[in-house]
């Protein structure tokens, strides 16, 4: 594990790294959804509870494979968090109306991404939506391409590849590319996908 990865494993370092861009990153979700209407949330790859504050009114479960992140999230929020592989989680109720994966799938290879998305489809309520925010690998040389390649996630993908992957499992409602940056300079290229059940 590289020094950068070891540092980002520390929850306070991870939160400090994410904080300046958190509102920008989550903006498309807020723009396209009434979060006050959300009832049951599954936050996949929740980290140290980065997104939890948006859902304090809802029945919320955060899942992350990193026990250190999960413990920090529990201490910070006092909510339900589970250190587990999401594909081993089975829902015992009518499903989640809001499944969120924020900057998660660029850490996962294609085969496991398909496996996870297929499982998430089984956890979604009939009237629910999956919401994915993830890192795009832009074409051509740019700061955004360089930073995507330096990211600790090994699988940022071109925009159309993301569309193809997400659309295999969910009916597209929103597919919106957007920049994250500062002072007009795009540092990361992102995509927001909102999908409905195909059933």
Image (spheres, helix red, strand yellow):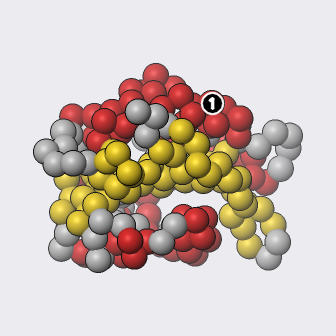
In the picture of the structure, the residue carrying the numbered disc 1 is: 164
- Residue 102 shown left or right of residue 150 in the figure: left
| Closest to the observer, 23 or 17 | 23
Q: What element carries label 1?
A: helix
- Residue 46 shown left or right of residue 23 in the figure: left
Residue 106 spot, x, y in % from top left: 53, 41
Residue 186 spot, x, y in % from top left: 77, 62
Image quadrant holding the C terminus, namely: top left
| Closest to the observer, 16 or 96 | 96
- Please report the residue visible at 31 percent of the width from the left and 36 percent of the height from the top: 122
Asked which quadrant contains residue 187, the reply is: bottom right
| Closest to the observer, 26 or 138 | 26
Residue 4, above or below 22:
above
Q: Which residue lies furthest to the right in this view?
A: 140
Residue 64 spot, x, y in % from top left: 30, 50
Total number of numbered discs in the rendering: 1
- Please report the residue visible at 45 percent of the width from the left and 27 percent of the height from the top: 114
In this view of the protein, can residue 179 be seen by the observer? yes
Q: Residue furthest top?
A: 111
Residue 47, above or below 93:
below
- Residue 188 shown left or right of residue 15 in the figure: right
- Please report the residue visible at 44 percent of the width from the left and 49 percent of the height from the top: 130
In this view of the protein, can residue 116 be seen by the observer? no
Image quadrant holding the N terminus, namely: top left
Residue 33 spot, x, y in % from top left: 52, 67
- Residue 84 shown left or right of residue 109 in the figure: left
């Amino acid at each position: 594990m590289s020094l950068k990865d070891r540092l980002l494993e520390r929850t306070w370092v991870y939160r400090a790294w994410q904080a300046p861009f958190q509102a920008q990153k989550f903006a498309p979700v807020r723009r396209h959804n009434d979060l006050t209407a959300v009832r049951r949330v599954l936050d996949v790859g929740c980290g140290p509870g980065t997104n939890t504050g948006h859902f304090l009114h809802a029945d919320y479960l955060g899942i992350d494979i990193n026990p250190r992140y999960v413990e920090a999230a529990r201490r910070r929020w006092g909510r339900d968090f589970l250190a587990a592989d999401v594909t081993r989680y089975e829902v015992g109720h009518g499903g989640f109306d809001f499944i969120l994966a924020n900057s998660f799938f660029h850490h996962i290879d294609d085969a496991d991404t398909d496996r996870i998305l297929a499982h998430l489809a089984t956890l979604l309520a009939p009237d629910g939506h999956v919401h994915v925010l993830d890192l795009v690998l832009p074409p051509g040389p740019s700061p955004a391409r360089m930073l995507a390649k330096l990211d600790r996630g090994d699988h940022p993908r071109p925009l159309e590849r993301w569309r193809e992957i997400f659309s295999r499992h969910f009916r597209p409602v929103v597919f919106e590319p957007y920049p994250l940056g500062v002072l007009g300079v795009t540092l990361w290229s992102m995509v927001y996908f909102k999908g409905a059940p195909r059933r």
